[in-house]
Amino acid sequence: MMNFEGLDPGLGEYAPGLHGGLEPGLDSSMDPRLDPALLQGVELDPDALAVPVSESMHIVEGMYSELHSMAAEVGIPVTATHFDLQEELLWMGNHRGHASSFFGPTMGRYSSFQVHMTDDIRHIQSMDTGVLFLTKNNLKCLTRGGLIMFDYPMEEGANMHSLILTDNNTLLMGGLQNYVAELDLTTVQETQKFTVEVPGVAIMKQSNRFFFCGHTSGKVSLRDLRTFKMEHEFDAFSGSLSDFDVHGNLLAACGFSSRGLNGLSCDRFLMVYDLRMMRAITPMQVHVDPLFLRFIPTYTSRLAIISQTGQCQFCEPTGLASLADIFHVNTVGQLLMSFDVSSSKQALSFGDSGGCVHLWSSAPEVSFNSYSRETELALPCLVDSLPQLDWNHELMPLSLLPMPLTSTEPLLSDWPTSLITPSPRRAPLVDPEILRTMKTVGFIGYAPNPRTRPRNQVPYKIKDIELEYDSYNQVPESPIGRDEEPHLYMVPKKYRKVTIKYSKLGLEDFDFKHYNRTLFAGLEPHIPNAYCNCMIQVLYFLEPVRYLVQNHLCQKEFCLACELGFLFHMLDLSRGDPCQASNFLRAFRTIPEASALGLILADSDEQTGKARLGRLIQSWNRFILAQLHQETLEQEGPQAYRGASSSTLGSSGESVIGRLFGCEVENSSLCRCGKETVRSSLTLLFTMHYPEQRSPDKTIEEYDFAEILKKSICLEQSTQAWCDNCEKYQPTVQTRNIRCLPDVLVINCEVNSTKEAEFWKAQTEYAYSKALKKEAAEPPKPKEPLPTEWCLEEELCSVEGLTFDTQAEDMRHVWIPLSLKMCISKSQGLEVSSLSEGEELTESEEAEGASVFDLVVTVSHIQDARTGGNLVAHIKVGETYHQRKEGVTHQQWYLFNDFLIEPIDKAESAQFDVNWKVPAVLYYVKRNYNAKYDLRIKNPIDASVLLTEASLARKQRKSHATFIPLMVSEMPQAADLVGLDAEFVTLNQEEAELRSDGTKSTIKPSQMSVARITCVRGQGTNEGVPFIDDYISTQEQVVDYLTQYSGIKPGDLDAKISSKHLTTLKSTYLKLRFLIDTGVRFVGHGLQKDFRVINLMVPKEQVIDTVYLFHMPRKRMISLRFLAWYFLDLNIQSETHDSIEDARTALQLYRKYVELSHNGGQEEFRKVLKALYEKGRKLDWKVPDIDSADGQGTAVFPSVMGL
């Protein structure tokens, strides 16, 4: 009888059709599936709700119905069932230790064997090679046919209940004891034990975040995947836990509750927990007494709840359970003992106490797994069942007919003895020098290494290897160094990967000027995913792109166009100092498309050189153009920054990126049936396609670059495609044509394999031989005079041999032209040809719409086995950039290799020796294309960014406010003072090594992230009162909050639990950018590091750093705490740092500095500094213990709450 007492009365308010009263004289004809034997001794409640059962027996798609039942051993309870994860098998184990398997939906018996003589089987788990069976104190692995692979007995007192495979070779076993054991399946040895609380672990599950352990005490604990330490615990039931399951972000559990002296009773409320917030959501009331439950996710996250009497109910974990979703397993009065769901979610299995296994399915043709391997079945006797051969079938294999063996003819498989005799390779002779100097002790000989061979290597005397070894020794010494590989000599020094050598002072004493003598800014390479530095430089030196992103500002937190605009602003301000793209790369890591395309590298891949950088940068090139096109094309919604003018370039419905790089393409597909389909699309770049080599001698034919480029743009290829006319996949010819020419032609070279590299190499050799012939036929041209500043002495400029230019030598390794002529004619379509230097278009060509494209960018992959390779860019920097940086107007090619920048010759930019320098990306621009674009920067950041904004933190209240925003009348003006301090947390720890002499060498510095930024007023009646005190929310994992130095505590940066004023980094960054653009002067202590981590470039005249104000040359830097004690009699930073206190103190110190400088002059101030350093040395720079109640600066500045 189903008892619904205690339920919500509203649940009974259904249509009358659902309330069928049950009469005492009920006969079985009402329901053909109702067994009369089930009604014997059953008291039916006439007031209870009847569950209607459909008349038909056929299986309805999506609804579970009984498919088959099989009695394994009658009367012996089935204690475990399991669907095989590799094959179409259903396993069961019973109370007497016997296991059986059934094949497919028909449940034909496959195998049956005894696992344990006495104990019941408690858990079954299939693996690739066999099946694991867990009993009380024994784990056994058998093949699917029943052969024992291993037998692992537990220690005495073990009472195991469940196991879980953590990977292919490791499993965890838990039970009613105070430990969980980890077993290595390769060695069948216990590797470690994890201590757990009594009464132990009865059920175990796993997700990608936690191990979930169910305890008989009614609790579910969440444990760390590596250490098994408990992270969270849910107290689900007061009595005991019967089952639980996990899916996505939900955990559902069923169990028993204590009912006082009556003991335990089955709880009809399922406990459901949200794993994102780690708290319970509304419990779910069901209509059956739950013993088992499983998530069965198909279209939704359905739950299957099973009672011991065979009632099953389906419901959503966050919705109401419906009576219509209940069905009954016909157990003929037996109780259900086990339950499992197949991996395909199409089949359910139930084991009952009578020894029966019931298979239910949701489809007539059920499969247990999505992709099952073929099950090995017993072969029938071939003698009795010879196949019937159809002689008329052409493909019938005659080998199916058994042939008698004859002793007269040899078989093909009988190899001659001479070919199968083992012939071991003879060991090489010992060096005679070793034998001569060897001393024997007992039967062991000792001799010094004569060093005639590489360490641990002995070459075998094979002719080819001998020749190769001899030539190896004759390679000239490497200019890189004596200890390095000789084949690396070909990589010039300026192209090698550059690294920053860190010292005690960090970057302060690293000489970047040695690598960059220009006024352009390099980019630092130590940040994760900084492989794209060269492409960032490429985009920066494209004038329309630079203006576009600097005019762009949107409300998205992570917008690559906004971050590029901020980065380009830094590159504009820099005077040769390197910048870092940390904020841009931080936003880049959050873009899902970048992760899906494999563009986000792990640190190990970058350091070990496993990444295929050439292919990677081409994918990145395609991604960034599409991303910028999308972000600047999107219509701006409500402005995140009140009053901020949206970009006129990005909100007009047509993206500047689309106008600049876009090319309208017409794709035509022609089926063999004659149906042609034409589609138009916009493409932002083109990929090179190289011709297949069809010559019999495998020689590579000569091609012109313009010819290959034309075929790559107007691509024609055959492929399988769907034809609507034929209604199937058909071979189609796909043709691509362009309707217009882009302003910037972007080409991915696709030299990703040896075949393409060999093709490119052959074409450079053809071009070089042509140049040699041409030079031999023409008289030499006088060389242009070198600038005098390039010559050490004037007479060197007129040395014989420098007066004539060897044009052919410049053509070595060059295949691509520096200029292209492109035209789209109505008659012949696209025409592409190379344009020699100095050649211009004729009037007729201009009238036809022809354009000249000049090469401005080449990106190369430098293949250097010593460092794993790197990416460099050759960029032709335009006149406007030189005008801004150097005050001159000329164009020049430069090599950009992270923070190494060097001018190069134009010929070098097109030279590709594919042995070490492989082309990746080419940019050709239409001559004078800049004239079409508005090249004016309208700074979109205005004063509205400083106004009041809402906090991201849910618990933040006005009473917690630590700052007062600026009023409109307080808006900062140029030269105003602003006190600033920032606090940081660590995202990645520093990587360092200890040298043999005990000194420490920093390999990679710690990666910091800004966590709190404070700005205080530097003048006016509210001087010293903060107007910015933002805690920065971060989505990245923090490894160290540095609480002692930063004052940041775990939870301060979490929007769910933080009580601070929490904002995004972009919001606070805009506030600082506005202050910088306004021209305020920042006062602080150690601001250089602060601005570096925030990723801001501040002009030196706008920075007043107290660490340098109170500093003597060649002396140590003095801490803010010591300066505050010495000059201001303040005791700060006694326990932890507070950025408001530090910013105020820095302002006071600056006022003190101005006072000392004006009153006594520089000579008197020098004496004050000397006294300061003498006092510091006496006290070992430690602040003596003083009374902390000296005001802490409150006498100087009013408090925030007082205002």
Image (cartoon, rainbow, N blue to C red):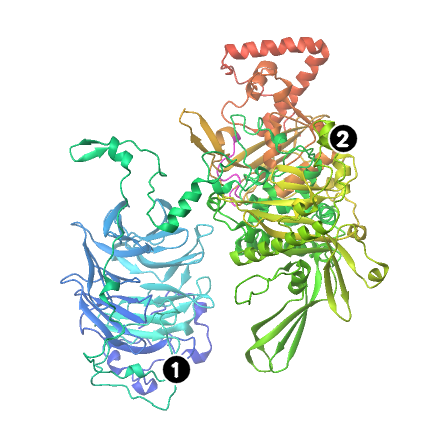
Question: Magenta region, mostly helix, strand or loop?
Answer: loop
* Image quarter (top left, top right, bottom left or bottom right) of the N terminus: bottom left
Q: Quadrant of residue 1113?
A: top right
Q: Residue at x 27, y 40 (%)?
A: 430
Residue 733 visible in the shown view: yes
Q: Quadrant of residue 151?
A: bottom left
- Judging depth in this view, the residue of 1030 and 317 nearest the camera is 1030
SS label for mark 2: loop
Report x, y in % for residue 374.
33, 72
- Judging depth in this view, the residue of 660 and 263 nearest the camera is 660
Report x, y in % for residue 1128.
61, 16
Task: Using residue 483 as the reference point, say whether residue 292 is left or right of it.
Answer: left
Region rendered in magenta? 1046-1057
State yes or no: residue 1051 in magenta: yes
Q: Which mark is residue 974?
A: 2
Q: Which mark is residue 446?
A: none
Q: Earlier in the sequence, mark 1 or mark 2?
A: 1
Report x, y in % for residue 632.
69, 54
- Judging depth in this view, the residue of 857 and 635 nearest the camera is 857
Residue 646 visible in the shown view: no
Q: Which mark is residue 54?
A: 1
SS label for mark 1: loop
Report x, y in % for residue 1147.
65, 23
Q: CA distance from mark 1 to mark 2?
A: 83 Å
Task: Using residue 7 as the reference point, say whether residue 700 is left or right of it.
Answer: right
* Image quarter (top left, top right, bottom left or bottom right) of the C terminus: top right
What's the amino acid at mark 2?
Ala
